[in-house]
Amino acid sequence: MSVINACSLIDAEILVIDNCSTDGSKVFLKDRFKEVNFTWHAENAGFSTANNLALLQAKGDIVLFLNPDTLLPEDCLKKCLQFYTSQPNMGACGIKMVDGSGHFLKESKRGFPSAATSFFKMVGLASIFPRSTLFARYYLGHLPNNVNHKVEVLSGAFMMVSKKVLDITGGFDEAFFMYGEDIDLSYRIEKVGFDNYFFADSSIIHFKGESTKKQTTLYIRTFYGAMKLFVKKHYYTSAAVSFTIVIETAILIKLIIASVKQWFKKTGNLLLKKPLSQVALNTIIVADKLDYAEMVTFLKMSASSYSIVGRVSVNIMDEDTIGSWQQLPYLITQHHIKHIIFCTDGKNIDSIILLMQQVAISVSFSFHLKGTKSIVGSNDKNSVGYFVTG
């Protein structure tokens, strides 16, 4: 729904390629959004293949590759297009992304991988020295997150590219089933002489964790396998050999760490007196009167584990509220709030992101977009998110 709202300010078409979803998406979606052109694959063809199919169908001069687990402010695409067309040598444009907890996603801007940068990331030096031009080059930590920059690698979760550029480079390499395809395309765009830009004057919410559960053996082997494929394709033999050694070492270390974490997680779950999903969370709903009433009814019908404390007004203080959303930090402390549900039509997502960043330490968030009859959220970028639907 947020994509539809963002497209209302520009001339655009929306293409959705479904890679054989097994969660009932086809039945739920196909008759709800008449503005969207759906293609339903009979098998999971992979991220690259699906995006290339959409590229073949696209009629516009500029294409945006966008993950489904995202929320866009209403003016986001308009701003991005204005920035895109203002740069004479623009190749691709990415955007500032935050996760479902309001934290900046470092993959919004990256440098090309090398044995050294990957090693610094793997051993933790990038985390110890997050602003270093040497140790933190993988995520370009020395570049501010709130300033537009020319960068090397953009995320395929939000990647705006013109047809003119794609006619020269081609689309995503379908040898990359998942992960690495955005690094490869970013590399090819720069190789033919265009620039890649990180755009910070707008931001989106990218829930993450929806494509693959992080820290699993499947994710680790898929992700690092993609890195090996990229190295083999683009680097000279001597560099590829040293990089491959680093990657194989990383796979081994990550698998050991993942096994230990999974063991502790299972042990911790056994010690819980009641499942976490059954623990009622003190919750406030940021909404107007109508949306609040609908949301309360919806949550009761869905048997969700939220203890509703009250309504917070979207703009100014009005009757039947416990406060305005400018007072959220105070309300969270006063009412021991653990969860906030934002009801939005896409017009105030920028403001929501700012509020999330102010109070993200103490609470979790979920989102209801008007017309969707559902709420979505993700409390951890390294695990699968959640949704409640009616």
Image: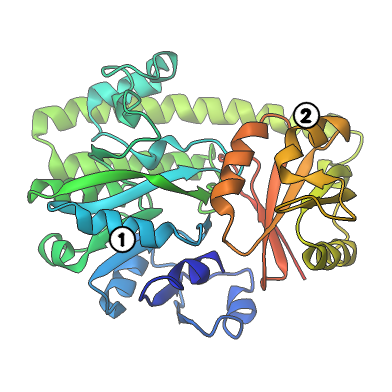
Q: Is residue 213 above or below residue 175?
A: above
The mark that comes first in sequence, 2 or 1, is 1
Q: Is residue 88 above or below residue 290?
A: above
Q: Quadrant of residue 122?
A: top left
| Circle on res. 268 | 2
Q: Is residue 85 above or below residue 182?
A: below
Q: Position of residue 210 (x, y in %)?
A: 55, 53
Residue 187 in view of the camera: yes
Please, what is the three-letter code of the amino acid marked with disc 1?
Answer: Leu
Q: Position of residue 337 (x, y in %)?
A: 83, 37
Position of 92 with respect to 378 (left or right) is left
Residue 177 in view of the camera: no
Residue identified by numbered label 1: 81
Q: In this view of the protein, which residue sits in the foreground, 92 or 167? A: 92
Q: Position of residue 30 (x, y in %)?
A: 57, 83
Q: Residue at x 86, y 65 (%)?
A: 293
